[in-house]
Amino acid sequence: MPAAQASPAPPRPPLWRAILNRRMLVSLVMGFSCGLPLLLTITLLQAWMKDEGIDLTLIGLMALVGLPYTIKFLWAPLLDRYTPPFLGRRRGWMLVAQVLLMAAIVLLGLSSPGRHPWLMAAAAFLVTFFSASQDIVVDAYRREDLSDQELGLGSSFYVNGYRVGMLLASGGGLLLADHLPFSAVYALMAACLLPGVLVTLLTPEPPLPADRPRSLGQAVLEPFREYFGRPQALLILGFILTYKIGESMATSMTTPFYLDLGFSKSEIGAVVKLFGFGATLGGSFLGGLLMLRLGTGRCLWGFGILQGLATLGFTALAHIGHHVPALAAVITLENVSAGMGTAAYMAFMAQQTNKRFTATQYALLSSLMGIPRVLASAPTGLLAKHLGWSWFFIFCTLAALPGLALLLKLAPGKDQPAPETA
């Protein structure tokens, strides 16, 4: 008998259909809603406190109100376990977080840094708490709404929306503050979250897994038991901690580096901030398109190598010196590669979550994502001082190699299957 022939692979949908659909629009808008609150308690609030004559010590201590972003995995199990009586498990919690977040932003705007600084700090803490809670549910919804093949492109839309939200809160907020009282600025920022509320009301609810946690104990313990029961659990954690460590170390010292080379603040603002912002958005979107066709595993390799080459570009710039076209070229390479790498990085983390408790596992992994940015960046000034700029950026490039080495086990040329969800 003739051998059975393998059935042909289903045709890929047209690229425009993969880009222009509801799921990508939801990722973009939700990214904007998650990015906007972040700098309302950092950049904008610091400017307000400075205007009010608040002591720099207290301004520095206000960074502590951002703690919920780091420990959000502690209450994420509650959002996996319980379902509100409206809109479902994900959309219900999203609506609750969004409404309370908007109220907290308005409350922060009505506070008085000069007369009641601790009430202002309490309001700022509520903003970060409800913002972190929104992050938890949005990340879980995105993981459950997108297919594994769409996670890369969806993550790029989310990242770009997030960055636009941050730009509106910081740049837009500061521009408005020159013409309006801060209470009005914060009220306007709260109103900018209304598109996210509208999307929450209109988008469909993902189906509930049949074996979702039925008790709080299961919601707390099972996500960790399931994750650490995997053979590659520690390798995945090691990869998350190291994949972008070289880039984080390098970018933490770029402003002093540019100033040392003789670039003016205007040149840095125009090339690094404005031109670089566009390059980052373009890189993220390009990375999402490539992941749609090549898969996350292959792209993690390519983008990781490109990130290392971009870091070496700073070494070249250190030898060239003050040269605006060279700065623009280095910034283009660095920001495009960073945007691509971040999209792949977030898609990889989402793929490692089990849909039975997406909120808890993604909150844990994304909390770990911020550790290298803080700890590895702390000694960069000392390293740059003693190594010099050229060798410092070479060191940062070498620091990225452990993350690539872990890919030999995690993604040896192909994508790994997502955790079982049944």
Image (cartoon, rainbow, N blue to C red):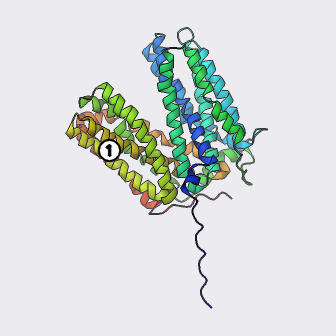
* Nearest the eye: 278 or 208: 278
337 vs 351, left or right, is left
The residue lying at 73 percent from left, 54 percent from top is 211
The residue lying at 61 percent from left, 20 percent from top is 187
The residue lying at 46 percent from left, 39 percent from top is 371
**Residue placed under numbered mark 1 in the picture:** 311
Residue 422 image position (x, y, % from top left)? 69, 59
| Image height of 75 relative to 410, above or below | above
285 vs 86, left or right, is left
Locate residue 37: give its quadrant: top right
Number of numbered discs overlaid on the protein picture: 1
Residue with the most extreme right position: 85
Residue 272 image position (x, y, % from top left)? 36, 34
* Residue 147 in view: yes
Residue with the most extreme bottom position: 1
208 vs 153, left or right, is right
